[in-house]
Amino acid sequence: MAASPIYLDHHATTPCDPRVLDAMLPWFTERFGNASSATHRYGWEADAAVEMARESLAHSLGAADPRELVFTSGTTESDNLALQGLVRAASAGEPHLVTTAIEHPAVLDVCVALEREGARVTRLPVAGDGRVDPAAVAQAITPQTLLVSVMAANSEIGTLQPLAEIGRICRERGVLFHTDAAQALGKLRLDVEALGIDLLSACAHKLYGPKGVGLLYVRDRRPRIRLLPLLYGGGHERGLRSGSLPVPLVVGFARAVELCLEELPGEADRLTALRERLWNGLRAGLPDLRRNGHPSERLPGNLNVCIPGLEADALIAALKDVALSSGSACASASGEASHVLAALGLSDSAARASLRFGLGRGTTQAQIDIATARVVEEARALRERGPRSAGLRKH
């Protein structure tokens, strides 16, 4: 049986940590109750487990009240609930939202849908390193602005946004601040009070937890935020998200975040060192390599590079022993170049020549060295064989 490829796509998803699985298993079997069943012990135990998980997650986010956390199916649903729920709960008028050009489609596509319903959306550009200028955020806010939505960390280029500055501006202007923290939770210290965040979306499977569960933090005081739900039928989660809670997944989510935060300082340093080793090794073998995103204000385990003279998809196809994705991962089905890299000012050919490396808990120095050698080897071979082998398109 062939060995599994070296996994360097941790921004797409992560393996479930065995310690997380151990925490979940009893809630699939002997402790299988519905957390909404209030008439017997099975339900009481499940409800208690959910509330313990909610308290743990609230503490990890610096939330004042665990009830401010709403469990969802993932970050996409949380983003939808935050944006759609807020706009549809607003009073009559033309609601205005401010976001950036490099948000995840779970935000950008919702904005398009809300525009069709009469909302107005301002999409701010970013600098060449992927960061939005807080001054541009301030300038974009109008008396009709309901919400500013800026992701904490970009899933493609790893760039971290100046959340504290944006949060301060929003608070001064009386505008709500939402952040998609799918890539940041468990990798950075997040404090919704200190950062001035009013709504925060996240999920478990990006941080060694189970797929299928997420959360939305909804501030309940100073100010209290009113959302209309997307789902009706039972009034679960304070009426914001109906549906029986997946107790094992909720328990696993909390355990995954606890482990990430316990190990965060050492793991962040380790991944940063491995990332720089990867960058230096690739650059030594491919001197014309270019790094996309901010050189230092980025996720510890993220490296996004442009390798001129080939298409990333051709290189990925040649690398059977390394699991990678291209910079256009979110648009891979459509064949379009990454909207994130385009927003950085990269040409279509440069965007298509970009690779994303996502390092994680299981990544070792030996794997980095093997992956570096294989990427350099295959990139050189594709270039030597000419434009057709390198996947280059005629324009």
Image (cartoon, rainbow, N blue to C red):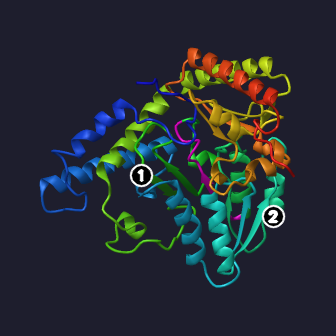
State whether residue 88 is above or below residue 361: below
State whether residue 128 is above or below residue 367: below
In-image side of 179 versus 387 (left or right): left
Label 1 to label 2, Cα distance in Å?
33 Å
Q: Which residues are magenta?
A: 174-186
Q: Position of residue 305 (x, y in %)?
A: 75, 33
Which residue in the structure is indicated by mark 1?
Answer: 213
Q: Position of residue 186 (x, y in %)?
A: 52, 37
Numbered tag placed on residue 140 in the rendering = 2
State whether residue 59 is above or below residue 261: below
Q: Nearer the viewer, mark 1 or mark 2?
A: 1
Residue at 83 percent across and 35 percent down: it is 309
**Dot 2: element:** helix
**Outermost residue to the left:** 40
Residue nearest the viewer, comparing 109 with 390: 390
Residue nearest the viewer, comparing 328 with 56: 328
* Residue type, mark 2 in image: Ala
Residue 386 visible from this viewpoint: yes
**Dot 1: element:** loop
Q: Position of residue 222 (x, y in %)?
A: 57, 61
**Which image quarter holds the N terminus?**
top left
* Residue type, mark 1 in image: Val
Q: Position of residue 272 (x, y in %)?
A: 65, 24
Number of other residues with Cα within 10 Å of mark 1, as a class: few under 14, some 14 to 19, many 20 or more: many
Residue 299 visible from this viewpoint: no
Residue at 77 percent across and 31 percent down: it is 295
